Amino acid sequence: MKLATTLTILALAFIVTVILAPIIIPLLRRLKFGQSIREEGPKSHMKKAGTPTMGGIIFLIAIILTTVGVGSYLDLFTTQTIVLLLVLVGFGLIGLLDDSLKVVFKRNLGLTSLQKLIGQIVIAVLAYFLLHGSFDTSLAIPFTDWTIDLGIFYVAFLIFWLVGFSNAVNLTDGIDGLVAGTASIAFAAFGVIALFQEQADIALFTFAVTGALLGFLLFNANPAKVFMGDTGSLALGGALAMVSVLEKAEFLLLLIGLVFVIETLSVILQVGSFKLRKKRIFKMSPIHHHFELSGWSEWKVVLVFWSTALAVALIGVLSEAFL
């Protein structure tokens, strides 16, 4: 894929998002799809109550239109593209239902964890069977030539990977612009890797996501005019994990997606510590709230996390290119 084509994909997804946002945001506001804020969360977040949520719809539409449109035009609409869109839309629909229930009942609780899990498993299994027969079921060990072939058990890994990272990105979505920025960096990194691998169909999808998220940031950066909600965060996490699977760079996602991994670990450690010792490790988890309660402004937290995401993404891309 040529540089001009890559830039065109980025620009197209960006423009579609920027056009859609001023149309959809007022609609969400009129429908009273406002965010409910956790009472136990940082007090500074209470002023955000009522900000339109489900904004993930905006960039999901832009990603779909760009991927399908450009993919059809350049003959890049493949089985892999279909699988990526299946995971993106499927996880997005789970998030949309979750967000809708929160709005209807005016509380910060939507689907139960079990209901989400069942939906995520169904989509992961569908993705596996769409790829089955022409798909490499081995796992590459980073920085080595070693691989582990999981065979039929790869479906269990795929479920774990998609569910784990969709929830990890969802946990990270707690500050204006945090996920939109870190996810755009991660998708761009995997887009570059797709170019190295000459997988133009995956590059098309990843750069469409990157462009759409950069457009969404114009409306989601502090002070946010709209939140992506679970509609966006679950979709992004599932799609990011699926991209790593199709590039056979599964474990590299632990590096490129390090911010999401740290956020998840902070929750696990906090819950474990409180259950075992009745003591908290952090002032609040996920860890971005700990820094907020330590006196950092939202912008400082976001910029530090973005910088971390950019640094590990560069390391990940360079390792794939030269090792």
Image (cartoon, rainbow, N blue to C red):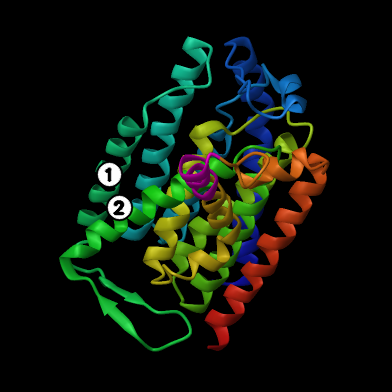
State the mark number for residue 121: 1
Quick check: 126 above or below 255?
above
Q: Amino acid at mark 2?
A: Ile
Classify mark 2: helix, strand or loop: helix
Q: Position of residue 210 (x, y in %)?
A: 61, 53
On the image, which quarter does residue 128 sit in?
Answer: bottom left
Residue 6 or residue 127, whichever sits in front:
127
Residue 275 magenta-highlighted: yes
Quick check: 51 above or below 292?
above
Whether label 2 touches label 1, CB < 8 Å? yes
Residue 281 magenta-highlighted: no
Residue 70 or residue 293, whichever sits in front:
293
Q: Amino acid at mark 1?
A: Ile
Quick check: 45 above or below 71?
above
**Residue at screen point 32% across, 82% down:** 147
**Residue at screen point 58% across, 61% down:** 258
**Residue at screen point 57% across, 81% down:** 319
Give, as a single range, the part of the protein colored magenta: 268-278
Q: Position of residue 118 (x, y in %)?
A: 27, 37
State the mark number for residue 159: 2
Q: Position of residue 25 (x, y in %)?
A: 65, 23
Residue 283 or residue 318, whichever sits in front:
283
Give neighbour class at mark 2: few <14, some 14-19, many 20+ (Cα, 10 Å).
Answer: many
